[in-house]
Amino acid sequence: MSSSAEKGEGGPFRLIVLASGNGSNLQAIIDDLHGRDGIEVVGVGSDKPDAFALERAQSAGIPTEVFPIEDHPNRSARDDAMADWTKGLEADLIVLAGYMALLTPGFIERFRNRVINVHPSLLPSFPGLDAIGQAIDAGVRVTGVTVHFVDEGTDTGPVILQRPVEVAPGMGRDELEEAIHAVEHALLPEAIGMIATGRVRIADEDPNRVIIDQ
Ligand code: GAR
C-alpha cells in the first residue's frame, strides 16, 4: 500500500502545516520546500491566535486560519472545522510542526496516513510534553528527532525517519534544544520531500512499518 499522500500528475503537492508556537519548523519548510519542486504550503493553521508561526506564514504570503478551542463547543467540533478547512484546501499532506493539541480520532480518520508529526526525541522514548526535559532528566547520552505518521495515540504511529542527537557531558537544556532544532529543520523537510515524491509507503504486511523506496 502506498501512502495516499503523493504528488499527482500536473498539480502541486499541497501541504497544510499546523503549528501552535514559534514555528521554526514551519520556517524550515517554507525556506526549503515552499514553491520548489512542485511543493506548495497552501495553508497554516493554529489553535493559538498569538502563535508566531502565523506571522511567519503571513510574511511568506501563505493563508492562515485559527481554530481556538474557545470558539467551539468541544475539541471534536473544533477539529471538524479544521478538517473541513483542510479538505477545502485540497491538502495532500498535513504536517504537525509544533502543533501541541491532540487531534481527535475523527480528524485522524478523515486523513489516515496523510498526517505527519515531528517530535524532539527518538520515539517511543519520551513521548508527550517536554521531550527534551524528559531526556535530560533521564540522563540519556543520546536522544534525537522522529518524524512519524500520526495515529490516535500521543506521539505514536509509524516512524518515517529518525536521527540521533548526542547529549554531550555538561550540555545544558538550551544547547540540547538548539541541537535538536537544527536536526528537526533538516529531517522534517527531508521526510516531506520523500512523501511528495511517492517514496514512502506503509508495509502491506505490517501497518506499523514504513518502507522508503530509494
Ligand atoms: C519542536 O521541537 C517540535 O518537535 C515539538 O515542538 C517544537 C516546536 O518548535 N513538538 C512536539 O513536542 C510534539 N509532541 P517550533 O514551533 O519552533 O517549530
Image (spheres, helix red, strand yellow):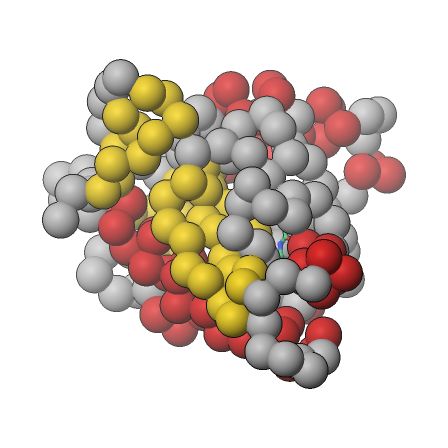
Q: Is residue 158 left or right of residue 170?
A: left
Q: Quadrant of ligand 1?
A: bottom right
Q: Is residue 85 above or below residue 39?
A: above
Relative image position of residue 92 (x, y in whole percent): 35, 38
Q: Is residue 47 visible?
A: yes
User: Is residue 173 shown above or below 51?
Assistant: below
Residue 6 shows in this picture: no
Q: Quadrant of residue 134 in the image?
A: bottom right
Q: Is residue 55 left or right of residue 32?
A: right
Toward the viewer: 121 or 26?
121
- How many numbered circles are shown? 0
Q: Looking at the image, which is closer to me, 69 or 142?
A: 142
| Residue 194 place in picture, x, y as percent | 26, 50
> x, y percentage for residue 47?
72, 47
Quadrant assignment, res 205: top left
Choose top left, top right, bottom left or bottom right for residue 49: bottom right
Q: Is residue 8 left or right of residue 132?
A: left
| In the rendered image, the vertical position of residue 210 relative to residue 24, given as above or below | above
In the image, 197 versus 151, the foreground residue is: 151
Q: Position of residue 145 (x, y in %)?
A: 50, 58
Q: Residue at x 37, y 50 (%)?
A: 161
Determine the residue positioned at 26% across, 65% down.
36
Q: Does 170 sit above or below residue 52?
A: below
Q: Residue at x 66, y 67 (%)?
A: 22
Residue at image position (54%, 75%) is 179
The image quadrant where one finds the N terminus is: top left
